[in-house]
Amino acid sequence: MAKYTLKVNGRNRTVDVEPDTPLLYVLRENLALKGPRFGCGLGQCGACTVHLDGQAVRSCLLPIGELKGAVTTLEGLGTSAKPSKLQRAFIDEQAAQCGYCINGMIMAAAALLEKNKFPSESEIREALAGNLCRCGTHQRIVAAIKRAAVA
């Protein structure tokens, strides 16, 4: 075990874990952040997506010992009482069905909107291409991102 101090959602947090522990496990188990989800464990589904210095990354693939930079999770974008503009758009469009993929979809969309304030539908679809949703709410997800872009 080793002690690591990470900056998560603007706060320094210290954990005592093995260096090969995936960031996802640290976030969920040590820091009780439930936004990032375990999906495939292979970085293919996007359910575990977080931002590392503003870039969308798969937290299931990133060992804590290799972490460099500030982490933002879904909880860092907004709260239940005060959701971010993007989270509010997902709620208004009822973009979640089962909700399992929504963490990854919102985090990928947030990274896109940081770089491109008014993305086209094809740019939105391209940004979400690495995220899987089995419920089929893609149309509502795209509509939510469009809504957030103009809000």
Image (tube, helix red, strand yellow):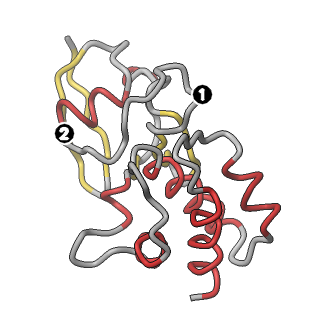
On-image quarter of the C terminus:
bottom right
Q: Secondary structure at mark 2?
A: loop
Q: Is residue 76 left or right of residue 143?
A: left
Residue to which mark 1 is pinned:
44
Depth check: 112 or 133 in front?
A: 133
Q: Which residue occupies 50% across, 47% down? A: 104
Q: Which residue occupies 48% across, 23% down? A: 40
**Image spot of residue 65 (x, y percent):** 39, 20
Depth check: 37 or 65 in front?
A: 37
Residue type, numbered disc 1: Gln
Is tag 1's residue or tag 2's residue first in the polypeptide sequence?
A: 2
Answer above or below: position of 46 versus 149. Answer: above
Q: Residues within 10 Å of mark 2 (few under 14, many from 20)?
A: some
**Image spot of residue 16 (x, y percent):** 17, 22
Residue type, numbered disc 2: Leu
Answer above or below: position of 82 versus 52. Answer: below
Depth check: 136 or 126 in front?
A: 136
- Taking the view exactly as shown, the residue that stands out farthest to the bottom is 151
Answer above or below: position of 98 versus 119. Answer: above
> What number of labels is visible?
2
Q: Quadrant of residue 44?
A: top right
Q: Is residue 22 left or right of residue 109?
A: left
On-image quarter of the N terminus:
top left
Residue to which mark 2 is pinned:
31
**Image spot of residue 97 (x, y percent):** 42, 55
**Image spot of residue 82 (x, y percent):** 27, 78
